[in-house]
Image: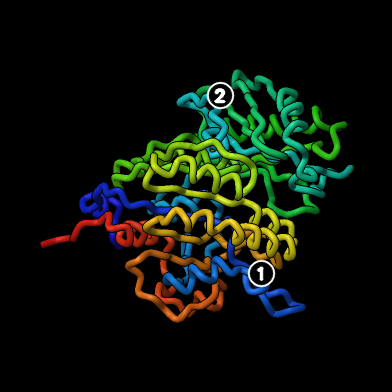
């Protein structure tokens, strides 16, 4: 496999521009009633046109049969090895909201959730409470446990950041989120002897949160995911000689992009707003990561029709990107989130790449089954970065 160090040796700065449009949770499964996936059901004239003009395939975020989280799904798209670089969601959420991280902090992604009288989870997202309600609840959770300060900050809707600030803490612990309803939150367990203190404090924090939030239905409990510390990474400018920027509405994705050296561009809450931001900053950067969350949210809610609507809304604004005449456009996802499963899945992700240097294939529509027949074949998502660079003429010849 061609490594980042090898790419670093042949990458070159050019004026050409790349747009990586990530439709979070893009891939789907057929609806039992119609036999069609969300993409096959949607009316997508602009994405279909790009598919005809470019080359398509299916990307594998981590490995065959492996269901990826959002972090490895995205790091693969940026050309990093998702197996050796596993960034915790706590760090991503914290960086995404500019939380003041200290070196020894253990950072956690918190979910407000709903539990019943028996302590079993009935809603892992507390009915997607408002960000305003979240902001009012977070200060109630701040405390000190065995000399370790527990700090919180709201992110969006039900999501918030927890920072455990103290000495001799290790992020090598399990999560309390069982990822299903009908069962209680799981106890946090140490994965190494050095993490025993962190596990004890996390479990004490969970008990405190349960007591503090008992009358705050639907947000009457918390779940903890992604215990992590901030990593040190080589940036995309250093590796690829790019000047990259991110346009995303959700803090976690802005955080991930910032960790790999992208500038974060302020934008509104819709894809139309993101396209406006892209146009505004078009001359300033040569790589744009544009993230759309709605498909993933609809898939996780099991709402097939809403996911269809979300991708159709994206399609309507595609001309706003193509009219800028980028040298390379890639449309893909970080993972599949079929509404049928109400969760991320292991299925390869539909991917299209457009540039003037594509070898056209026979694909005429942007769907899972069409991409299966595409010229890119089934390939690791971590190879997409070199394909984008090559099609933008940003790679020199390798070897003599």
Mark 2 and mark 1 lie on one chain; the one further toward the N terminus is 1
Which residue corresponds to the image point at 30% horizontal and 60% vertical from the top-left?
390
**Of residues 244 and 220, which is closer to you in this image?**
244
Secondary structure state at the residue bearing disc 2? strand
**Of residues 313 and 40, which is closer to you in this image?**
313
Locate the N terminus by quadrant.
bottom left
Residue 42 numbered mark, or none: 1
**Of residues 393 and 307, which is closer to you in this image?**
393
In terms of image quadrants, where is residue 300? bottom right
Secondary structure state at the residue bearing disc 1? loop
Q: State whether residue 51 is above or below residue 320.
A: below
Q: State whether residue 309 is above or below residue 172.
A: below
Locate the C terminus by quadrant.
bottom left
In the rendered image, residue 256, in percent from the top left (x then y), is placed at 49, 42
Which residue corresponds to the image point at 65% horizontal and 22% vertical from the top-left?
145
Residue 196 visible: no
Which residue corresponds to the image point at 48% horizontal and 68% vertical from the top-left?
50
Q: How many marks?
A: 2
303 left or right, relative to 385? right
Q: Residues within 10 Å of mark 2 (few under 14, many from 20)?
A: many
Distance (Cα) linking label 2 and label 1: 47 Å
């Amino acid at each position: 496999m061609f490594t980042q160090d090898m790419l670093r040796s042949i990458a070159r700065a050019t004026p050409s521009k790349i747009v990586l449009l990530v439709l979070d949770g893009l891939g789907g499964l057929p609806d039992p009633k119609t036999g069609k996936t969300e993409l096959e059901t949607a009316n997508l004239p602009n994405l279909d046109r790009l598919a005809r003009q470019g080359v398509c395939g299916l990307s594998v975020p981590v490995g065959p049969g492996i269901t990826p989280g959002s972090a490895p799904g995205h790091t693969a798209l940026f050309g990093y090895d998702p197996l050796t670089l596993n960034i915790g969601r706590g760090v991503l959420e914290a960086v995404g909201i500019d939380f003041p991280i200290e070196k020894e902090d253990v950072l956690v992604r918190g979910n407000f959730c709903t539990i019943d009288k028996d302590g079993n989870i009935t809603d892992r997202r507390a009915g997607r409470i408002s960000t305003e309600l979240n902001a009012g609840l977070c200060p109630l959770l701040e405390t000190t446990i065995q000399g370790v300060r527990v700090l919180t900050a709201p992110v969006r809707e039900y999501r918030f950041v927890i920072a455990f600030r103290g000495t001799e803490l290790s992020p090598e612990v399990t999560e309390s989120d069982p990822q299903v309803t009908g069962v209680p939150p799981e106890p946090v367990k140490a994965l190494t002897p050095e993490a025993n203190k962190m596990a004890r404090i996390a479990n004490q924090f969970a008990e405190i949160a349960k007591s503090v939030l008992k009358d705050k239905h639907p947000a009457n409990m918390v779940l903890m995911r992604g215990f992590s510390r901030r990593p040190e990474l080589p940036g995309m400018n250093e590796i690829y000689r790019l000047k990259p920027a991110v346009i995303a509405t959700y803090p976690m994705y802005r955080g991930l992009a910032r960790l790999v050296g992208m500038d974060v561009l302020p934008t509104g809450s819709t894809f139309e707003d993101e396209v406006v931001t892209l146009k505004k900053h078009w001359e300033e950067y040569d790589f744009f990561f544009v993230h759309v969350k709605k498909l993933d949210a609809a898939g996780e809610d099991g709402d097939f029709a809403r996911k269809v609507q979300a991708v159709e809304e994206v399609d309507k604004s595609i001309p706003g990107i193509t009219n800028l005449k980028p040298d390379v456009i890639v449309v893909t996802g970080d993972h599949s989130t079929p509404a049928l499963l109400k969760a991320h899945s292991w299925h390869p992700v539909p991917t299209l790449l457009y540039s003037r240097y594509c070898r056209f294939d026979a694909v005429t529509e942007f769907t899972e089954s069409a991409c299966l027949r595409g010229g890119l074949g089934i390939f690791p998502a971590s190879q997409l970065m070199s394909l984008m660079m090559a099609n933008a003429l940003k790679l020199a010849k390798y070897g003599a």
